[in-house]
Amino acid sequence: MKKTTTTLIEMKAQGEKIAALTAYDYILATILDEIGIDLILVGDSLGTVFAGYETTVQVTLEQMLYHTKIVSQQVKNALVVGDMPFMSFQINPEEAVRNAGRFLQEAGAEAVKLEGGEEIAPTVRRIVNAGIPVMGHLGLLPQSVHKYGGYAVRARESKEAEKLRQDAKILEECGVFSIVLEKIPHQLARQVSQSLSIPTIGIGAGPHCDGQILVTPDMLGLFERFHPPFVRRYAELNKEMKQACTAYLQDVRTEKFPSLKESF
Ligand code: KIV
């Protein structure tokens, strides 16, 4: 059954956990949709895990639209959310609305995600008022890596924790349908989740969020450059792919591939 933003809000109300993952291409989008994942985020994490950039800051709007279109074309059941990249929504609300609209109109997404709290509230309100569902994102904001000087756990201190609680409330008032909480203490994630009627989706934010998301190439053991401690690896695909490619390489060199059966 097709999942919508309303489905996710109802899941929270019924105490059902939401499972989300990222996808950037046709194969993964198809797999995730077939297994019944609730939400697929075409995350700007594709900058690091797909394109091999150092950060997500380099990811452009055109790149995000390209990948979002590929994913949304395949997906029949999951809610598809397109991630608004750095500088696609910060300049002014008008430009943000226009860019958010492109995710729905050109790329087939059903919602967009924006990183930030109170600072972007007027922008979020404008996008929501234009009829575009918005997912918030608080805690660690990878697009602000240069501002914070790294990817450390956020909101450990009470002042930052209080700001995060307020930001979550403000985003809910602006009409977001869900909020990603990234890399914050689990006690704070629980407080925020309990204080909202919209679902929180955690990544490195402990078990008390209303749902969970991981970057799929991380949890599949495909992306090996770093391994965040909160990522559970459900497979070791990088190793398996290396083994398979090495076997092919050897077979070609030793004339074991192709056989006559694999020839015409
Ligand atoms: O870009 C992304 O994949 C994300 C998730 C980490 C939530 O923002």
Image (cartoon, rainbow, N blue to C red):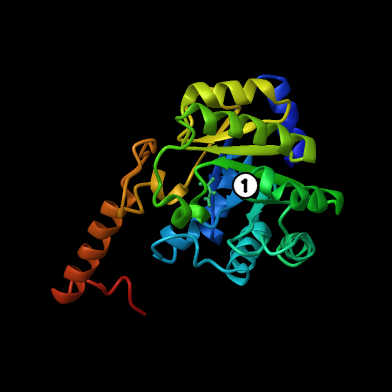
Where residue 102 sits in the image (x, y, percent)? 75, 65
Q: Is mark 1 within 8 Å of ligand 1?
A: no
Tag 1 residue: 116
The quarter of the picture where residue 178 lies is top right
Q: Quadrant of residue 259 in the image? A: bottom left
Give the left or right position of residue 115, taking residue 239 as reference: right
Is residue 258 in view? yes
Q: Quadrant of the C terminus?
A: bottom left
- Whether residue 18 is visible: no
Element type where label 1 sits in the image: loop
Position of residue 155 measured from the top left corner of the image (x, y, whole percent): 49, 33
Does 250 sit above or below residue 220? below
- Position of 148 compared to 257: left or right? right
Q: Residue at x 61, y 26 (%)?
A: 192
Q: In the image, is residue 82 above or below residue 152?
A: below
User: Which of the two residues, 217 or 243, is positioned nearer the viewer here?
Assistant: 217
Assess disc 1: are there few (<14), some (14-19) or many (≥20) residues with their C-alpha within 10 Å of its C-alpha.
Answer: many
**Can you say which quadrant of the picture contains the N terminus?**
top right
Comparing 174 with 257, the one in front is: 174
Q: How many marks?
A: 1
Query: Picture coordinates of residue 221 (x, y %)?
Result: 34, 47
Q: Position of residue 151 (x, y in %)?
A: 40, 47
Q: Residue furthest bottom?
A: 264
- At x 74%, y 60%, the residue is 100
Single out the residue that lies furthest toward the left: 254
Residue at point 54%, 44% (across, down): 21
Judge from the rendering whether residue 164 lies leftward or rightward of residue 253; answer left or right.
right
Q: Disc 1 residue type? A: Gly
